[in-house]
Image (tube, helix red, strand yellow):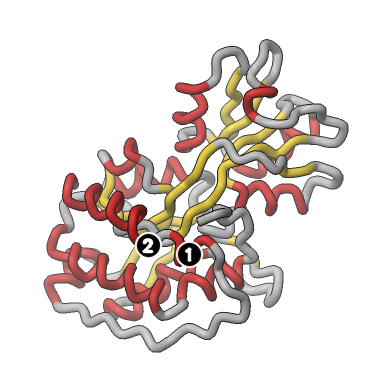
Amino acid sequence: MRRWLHSLILALALGLSACAGLPTGSVPGVLQVQASDSVRQALAPSGRLRVGVYPGSPTSSVTSPRTGQPAGIAYELGHVMAQQLGVPVQIVTFKRVAEIVDALKAGQVDMTFTNASPARAREVDFTAPLVQLELGLLVPPGSTLQGLADADRAGVRIGVSQGSSSQAALGARLQQAKLVPAASLEQAQQMLRSGQIEAFATNKGILFEMAEKLPAHRVLDERWGLENLAIAVPQGREAGREFLQRFAHEVQRTGHIQAMAERAGLRGLARGQ
């Protein structure tokens, strides 16, 4: 696990700038990553690649705003990875990302695409990061909040996805505001509509998706942090490690990640990288 975490840190230092400003109209190159029988057995032990996704996030699973077809980076990466492994794909849908991480730990799913936080890197294994997103706040109409420091005061309730890395990060950072966990992004939208929370915190890719369903709600310009998203698999699958790192490199080099992000309508990419 330490070697994988080292790879994650190295990738941040050397290559994340390539994914910060994803080009429009990308045409992916040919992707060919060979998998041996031992790699297939390690990464898809059930004979199919079980991919964990949750709805409402362009980095996971959404309906493409351009085509009306299923999209999302985790959703599409799962299909491409299964093709390279030579096995069928099985999409497994959860309410929130924390449930997927738990399923990875239990060996109930084989891969997903999520924030490679240090806490999660102690529980599952990651490839090098492929996408860097800003973390922000979504606020309702008439809100006077300007940023996280402004929101950190008594009486302010900030929603987060239950068990998310945002919940962990803000729990250690906020002094006065109260965190209110939401069981799903749908519930978070209802909480904003009903005034149960004054803001919702997560990556801006999700926030912009939510804002489209919540008239007059807005994503604040400020970023209070960054997410570095990578392919995640259960620990103990060392026989597939080299394949995964090579696969991660190739889907970025050939433009597959860029094309997936475009189809999913991903916004909120880190600026100034």
Q: Is residue 8 visible?
A: yes
Q: CA distance from mark 1 to mark 2?
A: 8 Å
Q: Which amino acid type is marked by label 1?
A: Cys
Q: Is residue 99 left or right of residue 183?
A: left
Residue at (35% x, 80% y) in the render? 83
Q: Is residue 179 left or right of residue 189?
A: left
Q: Is residue 24 left or right of residue 139?
A: left
Q: Regarding mark 2 in the picture, which secondary structure is present there? A: loop
In the rendered image, residue 44, in percent from the top left (x then y), is placed at 25, 66
Residue at (58% x, 23% y) in the render? 179
In the rendered image, residue 25, in percent from the top left (x then y), is placed at 61, 81
Vertical placement of residue 247 versus 234, above or below: below
Vertical placement of residue 187 versus 238, above or below: above
Q: Nearer the viewer, residue 152 or 14?
A: 14
Badge 2 local density, few (<14 within 10 Å), some, or many (20+)? some
Residue at (15% x, 78% y) in the render? 36
Do the residues under discs 1 and 2 have CB atoms within 8 angstroms? yes
As drawn, the residue found furthest toward the bottom would be: 30
Badge 1 local density, few (<14 within 10 Å), some, or many (20+)? many
Vertical placement of residue 75 versus 12, above or below: below
Q: Regarding mark 1 in the picture, which secondary structure is present there? A: helix
User: Which numbered circle lies on residue 15?
Assistant: 2
Look at mark 1 in the image and give the residue it sits on: 19
Residue at (16% x, 52% y) in the render? 236
As drawn, the residue found furthest toward the front would be: 272
Q: Nearer the viewer, residue 186 or 242?
A: 242
Q: Which amino acid type is marked by label 2?
A: Gly
User: Which numbered circle lies on residue 102?
Assistant: none
